[in-house]
Image: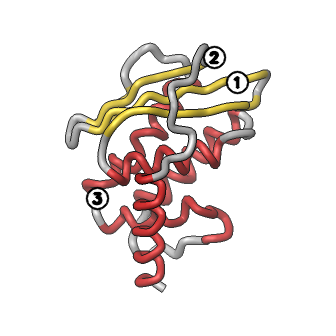
Amino acid sequence: MIDELRELYQEVILDHNKNPKNYFHMENPTHSAEGHNPLCGDQVEVFLNVEGDVITNISFQGHGCAISKAASSVMTTVLKGKTIAEAKEWFNRYQHLVTSDMGEVVDFDAFGQLAVFAGVREFPMRVKCASLSWHTMLQALENKNEVASTE
């Protein structure tokens, strides 16, 4: 199963890096934030439109490594249509996924396409790349006027 996860991880990373979803500068977002990973230079901006309690639209732009871009792309597809509370819960679940022990079994049904990011657990330095956009999204939802960082 580990080899299958590794292969799927590579496929998803490459696909979302090459063809990112929701990769655009949103005009007039209700929430936005910038994020920076000083360790490797990844930079991302996350834009959200929130109506009531629901994320009706989410996009990102920026530059960085393939893992950072792919994680941002997948995040936007997962969070669109979710409530703010659900987005924060997904943030916590995702953080646990990418930082948990390698021996911990991943429930693919519970995580969907996010499950492939469990592969970054093998490369602790890449966890920050995989989580930058998530930290930035949370920063945007909390209307904090500071640059999100993985440090």
**What residue is drawn where x is 44% and y is 13%?**
145
| Residue sitting nearer the eye, 53 or 19 | 19
Tag 2: residue type? Thr
- Image coordinates of residue 22 in percent, x first then y, are 57, 39
- Image coordinates of residue 116 in percent, x first then y, are 49, 66
- The residue furthest front is 19
Point out which mark residue 30 bears: 2
The Cα–Cα distance between marks 1 and 2, rounded to whole angstroms, is: 6 Å
| Residue sitting nearer the eye, 20 or 123 | 20
Q: Quadrant of the C terminus?
A: top left
Q: Secondary structure at mark 1?
A: strand
Q: Is residue 83 left or right of residue 92?
A: right
The Cα–Cα distance between marks 3 and 2, rounded to whole angstroms, is: 33 Å
Viewer-nearest of labels 3 and 2? 2
Tag 3: residue type? Pro
Q: For the residues labelled 1 and 2, say whether their Cβ atoms are less than 8 Å apart.
A: yes
Q: Which residue is mark 1?
A: 50
- Image coordinates of residue 111 in percent, x first then y, are 62, 62
**What residue is drawn where x is 48% and y is 40%?**
134
Which badge, 1 or 3, is on the more N-terminal residue?
1
**Dot 3 crowding, Cα within 10 Å, few <14, some 14–19, many 20+:** few
- The residue furthest left is 39
Q: Secondary structure at mark 3?
A: helix
Is residue 82 placed above or below 123 in the rendered structure? above
| Residue sitting nearer the eye, 42 or 25 | 25
Which badge, 3 or 2, is on the more N-terminal residue?
2
Point out which mark residue 10 bears: none
Is residue 58 placed above or below 122 in the rendered structure? above
Is residue 141 placed above or below 86 in the rendered structure? above
